[in-house]
Amino acid sequence: MTKILIVEDNEMNRDMLSRRLIRNGYEVVMAFDGAEGVEKAGSENPDIILMDMSLPIIDGWEATRRVKANPATSRIPVIALTAHAMSGDRDKTIAAGCDDYDTKPIELPRLLGKIQAQLQKAKESDGNS
């Protein structure tokens, strides 16, 4: 079963997203701030990370940089989830190391498509190494 790490400090967003992903057949683990997200990326070995960018302790940009800088977790795809939909925000998340970007409020069909695309890309790159 595909394991998704949700790094989200808003309880309502976390609950709604986790229930919808579980209904779609995913295993879900959660972190409540950026520091815990970095720690769980290493301990839980998720297949993909959904990273809120506005997080306490360390923000999603810094958490993503730390995940991508660690050889043990650098291969894990990260999709940024953010209410920031201004021009340049997508570029900022990609520059931090995110593999894709989605805006809140979340449209589940669009997000599921992005999750599948990133999992497929990760699978193909693992096959080539």
Image (cartoon, grey):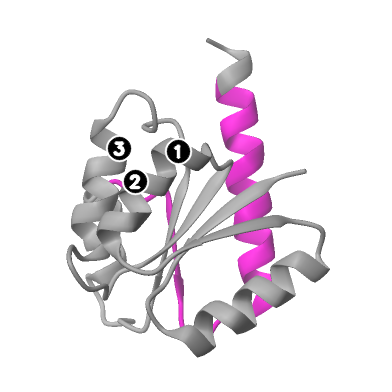
Residue at position x 51%, y 84% from top?
13
Residue 91 visible within the image: no
Please check the rendered image and state whether residue 95 is part of the magenta-colored stretch, yes or no.
no
Q: Which of marks 1 and 3 is in front?
A: 1
Toward which corner of the image does residue 101 lie, by quadrant?
Answer: bottom left
Separation of disc 1 and disc 3 at Cα? 15 Å
Pointer 3 or 2: first along the chain: 2
The reply to whether dot 1 and dot 3 touch (C-beta < 8 Å) is: no
Q: In the rendering, at what x and y percent does residue 72 appear?
A: 38, 25
For label 3, the residue is 68
How many other residues sit within 10 Å of disc 3, few (<14), some (14-19) or many (≥20)?
A: many
Q: Which amino acid does label 1 sit on?
A: Ser
Task: Tell me, yes or no, whether the highlighted magenta stretch contains residue 110.
Answer: yes
Amino acid type, residue under disc 3 in the picture = Lys
CB under 8 Å between discs 3 and 2: no
Q: Element type at marker 1? A: helix
In the rendered structure, find residue 92 and report the number of the disc placed on it: none
Question: Is 52 above or below relative to 85?
Answer: above
Above or below, 99 against 86 in this view is above
Q: Classify mark 1: residues with Cα within 10 Å, few (<14), some (14-19) or many (20+).
A: few
Q: Give the range drawn in magenta.
A: 97-125
Relative horizontal placement of residue 81, taking residue 25 as reference (left or right): left
Q: Residues within 10 Å of mark 2 (few under 14, many from 20)?
A: some
Residue 23, given in percent of the width and then of the height, sits at 82, 70
User: Which residue is found at the position 44% from the left and 31% from the top?
Assistant: 75
Residue under pointer 2: 39
